[in-house]
Structures are given as C-alpha cells and as structure tokens.
Image: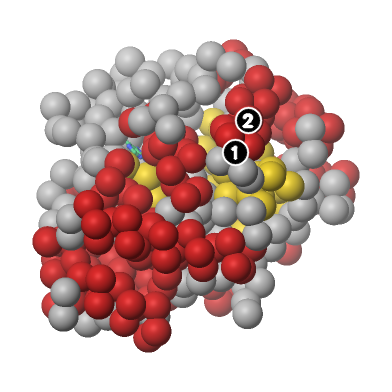
Amino acid sequence: MNNTELIKKLNKERNLSEKEWIQIFDTYDEEDLEYAMDMAHEITVARFGRKIYFRGIVEFTNVCRNDCYYCGIRAGNSNCQRYRLEKEDILKCCEDGYEHGFRTFVLQGGEDPHYTKEVMTDIVRAITERYPDCAVTMSIGELDRDFYQALYDAGARRFLLRHETADAAHYGILHPKEQTLSSRMRCLKDLKEIGFQTGCGIMIGSPGQTSEILAKDMMFMADFKPEMIGLGPFIPHKDTPFKNEPAGSVEKTLLVIALCRIMLTDALIPSTTALGTVEAEGRQKGVLAGCNVVMPNLSPMEVRKKYMLYDGKVGTDMSAEAGIRALRSQMEEIGYEVIVARGDFQKR
Ligand code: SAH
C-alpha cells in the first residue's frame, strides 16, 4: 500500500501495524503530509467545529530535581536563575486568567521538592474552591500514586505527563539512568486508573529518534488512548548536552499531529508554544493539522524568561493579556474562534 492508502486505512481502523507506521515515517512526502493534514483537519472540524479551547498555563516553579538532557531547567543547568511562585502568586495568575475567560488552569513546573503533597494539594484545593467552574490540570512530573490520588481528591482532574518516547533505549539517550521509561509508564498507568484525563506525548525530532521509535510511540498511544496529547518539535537549549543538536522539523511535527488526530479522534491536542517557536505560523498550522487547544501563558512577566525549556521560546516578552490577544488573532486569521469553556474530554 502507498502512504495515502495507509492513511485511509488508519482512518478506518484507528491503528496500523508497526511496519506500516515505519513506512509512513520513512517515506512520506509533501503530498502525503497534505493528505494527512486535510483528513485530520476535516475530522477535527466535524468533531469540534472551528473552535479552539484555551488553557492558561502557570509555570509556577523552575526548580527541578531531574536532569533531562533536553530541558533548559534541568538540575544541572547552573545558568538557570531559579524561582518559585507561592500560593498567593498562583491564585493571582488564576484571577487574571479568569477575567480573561480562562476556564482551565494548567499548573506546570519542574519536579520541585518544595511542593510537597500538603503544599500542592492546598494550592489545588484553593483554586478549585474559588473557581468551581474551572478545571485544574497538573503538569508536575513523576510522583507516587498517593500524591497523584491526593491531587485528584483536591479537585485536579487532568494531568499532563509526556512519555517522551516509548522506546526504553531512546528514553536512556534523553535522560540520566535514574530516570526510566518503566517509571514513567507506571505514572501514566496510575494517573489513568485514578481517573485523571491523562495526557502523554513526545517531542518530534529529539536526538536519537528514528522511524522505528516513532512507530512505537504511535502504537503506545493507540493502546493507551490518552485523553490529551502534547506534541512539539524538539528545540535545543544552549545550556544542555543537546545544545548542538538540530531542532525537529515543523513538517514532521504536523505529520505526527495529523496522524494522532486521525487515530484518536476525540483527543484534546494543543498547538504548542514549541511549534509556534520554530515557525511564526506554526501554531496556526498545528490547528490546520488537527489541534484543538492552545495554551497561552499566564505566568507573571518577571518569571517568564526564567522558564526556558528551550532557546527562543515565544511569548516570554509579552504580558498575559497581550499573549492571549496575539493567540486569539492568530486563530481568527485562520477562521477559528477561541472559546470560553472547560472543554473536558468527551468520548463519542
Ligand atoms: N516537569 C514537568 C513539565 C516538563 S516541561 C514534567 O516532567 O512533565 C513539559 C514538556 O516540555 C516536556 O515533557 C518536554 O516534552 C517538553 N520540552 C522540554 N524541553 C524541551 C525542548 N528542549 N524542546 C522542546 N520541548 C521540550
């Protein structure tokens, strides 16, 4: 079968064999990409309309105990100026966000031991009590099951934890040996079992990624059925071991987005900041490839430049309000409306 036939098959069966996935990643051309994007876009419009959900992301700490080789806020980066936002600062971000129409707050940070189970659940509870009409999404890495359960009990309902790669050896290229794929998978399984809407995902073009590995990622996602999928190009950061590695391509990122949409038609897929960073029109293209979420930054101006996961991150010199305005007009440019709604996952 040629690639367009494989894409049609994916649309019918919602999965492909390992060999078929590898063929697509190895041999796709411009036409195949266009075909996949058009199909994914059609599916997205039929399912969600020309509407984009928006989530406000609060980057509340850049302190991290981990040393992921790709990430600018890794423990080993001594050039990174560290910061933490306390409860009141975080609540202030939510207050601003609420006024601008946000109904989902994403709390993202490094794995910072300062935020113990008690501290973190207290913050989550304060947000959910103050904004009962809003969803709280966590993106704070690997924790034990008790901790995840406590966050759920405090009112958090979504959790983003990219698996980064479904191949154990590749996981080992991206992380020090203390961090393992099996631990990451344990976390994802726990999160789902507890009842979180769970997000996994990958960077496209991370060092060592091959078509075989991307095939494994697709098969993992077909099986795991994440409610959310985070996908963006890898972008090097100057203070990491990967500083000289090339960034992932926009085209391949769009291909993976489109294939994920065709495979998991109900999923919430954000058009990421990383995609908007490698190309000015990146986020619009993401939407045209099947994304249905954008995540403007709600972090205070003073800390924006310190939450640098990769070089050149867009939006760090804009206020929350200006960032939202910019995103809104980017979406309007392509005929989309940014909508005020919690936008929970719904299976059809
Ligand atoms: N500590 C949290 C949040 C990590 S940041 C956690 O572990 O989940 C969120 C995502 O940003 C990561 O999962 C990773 O896929 C992505 N990221 C980190 N460094 C990046 C880089 N250099 N280029 C592109 N994406 C990156």
Q: Quadrant of the C terminus?
A: bottom right
Count of numbered labels shown in the rendering = 2
* 166 lies left or right of 108: left
| Quarter of the image where one finds residue 289 | bottom left
Query: CA–CA distance between discs 1 and 2?
Result: 5 Å
* 223 lies left or right of 113: left
Mark 1 neighbour density, 10 Å: few (under 14) some (14–19) many (20 or more):
many
| Quarter of the image where one finds residue 167 | bottom left
Assess whether mark 2 and mark 1 are in contact (beta carbons under 8 angstroms).
yes
Amino acid on which disc 2 is placed: Ser
Amino acid on which disc 1 is placed: Met
- As rendered, which of 81 and 319 lies closer to the eye? 319
The residue lying at 15 percent from left, 33 percent from top is 245
Answer whether residue 245 is visible to the viewer in this image. yes
Mark 2 neighbour density, 10 Å: few (under 14) some (14–19) many (20 or more):
some
Residue behind mark 1: 331
Answer whether residue 169 is visible to the viewer in this image. no
The residue lying at 61 percent from left, 43 percent from top is 335
Residue behind mark 2: 329
